[in-house]
Image: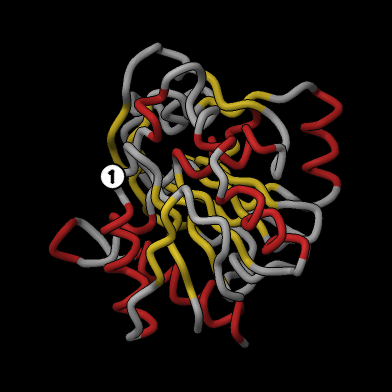
Amino acid sequence: MRSGVAIFPGSNCDRDIIVALKKITRKVPLKLWHKDTEIPNLDLIVLPGGFSFGDYLRCGALAARSPIIRNIKDHVSRGGALLGICNGFQILIETGILPGSLIRNKKLLFTCRETILEIQKTIENPFTKGFKEGFNLKIPVAHNEGNYFAPAPLLNELDSEGRIAFKYVKGDNPDSNIDYNPNGSSNDIAGILSKNGRVLGMMPHPERAINPLHGGSDGLKFLTKSIEHIVG
């Protein structure tokens, strides 16, 4: 398994995902600086969470114009797997690798808490292949601009093409006062896939749920199965 983590000024979850990938693969991922213009062939590249370039202009807008993006697009064109988490998802939107927009949370407040994700019926892809449709994962979010917005035709297209990977759901939490959708995303969308299924953008942080001592290990389960199917 050959993996790399792209790092931008302001990334702050790069170490977390590096620890998670090392735990699963027993290999340290390559650290890819945003100014790198040449990167080796990799099986997986991860764009981590954080506040790239301080979230100036729009979240991910400046990172999307970094030199490394050309190499990342080449990686995608070769069929390489690409995972964007939180700010990484925002960067994927800004680069045009994934469609739609990520705007301010509905309540205009930063939110940091656990969410329940439900696996959707999807196209062939390595990220959800190891799970049955309807399976729930408990994974936290931490963002201010995670409200996925898209016009109705695009939302219908994503749904009909099986490109919605996860949705926020209530799960078995009996507390009806909890707003299960933490940001107001259209159709409760928490993550979407590219047309070929090799790129996933998601707002929740699986790298923050890799140890029961930290509140749960569903993120480890998700990342492990993803890697198994990327290299399988």
Q: What element carries label 1?
A: loop
x%, y% of residue 124? 76, 68
Q: Locate residue 9, reporting x and y percent.
A: 35, 39
Question: Which residue shows up at 45% across the image and 38% down it?
Answer: 87
What is the basis of the colouring in this image?
A: secondary structure
Q: Is residue 31 above or below residue 67?
A: below
Nearest the eye: 199 or 125: 199
Q: Quadrant of residue 174?
A: top left
Name the residue located 38 percent from the left edge and 44 percent from the top edge.
49
The percent position of residue 203, horizontal first and vertical second, equals 47, 41
Expressed as whole percent of the image width and height from the top left, the position of residue 61 reads 55, 28
Q: Quadrant of the C terminus?
A: bottom right
Question: Badge 1 is on which residue?
Answer: 12
Q: What residue type is labelled 1?
A: Asn
Whether residue 73 is visible, yes or no, is: yes
**Residue shown at 45% from the left, 19% from the top:** 105
- Horizontally, residue 172 falls left or right of residue 216, namely right
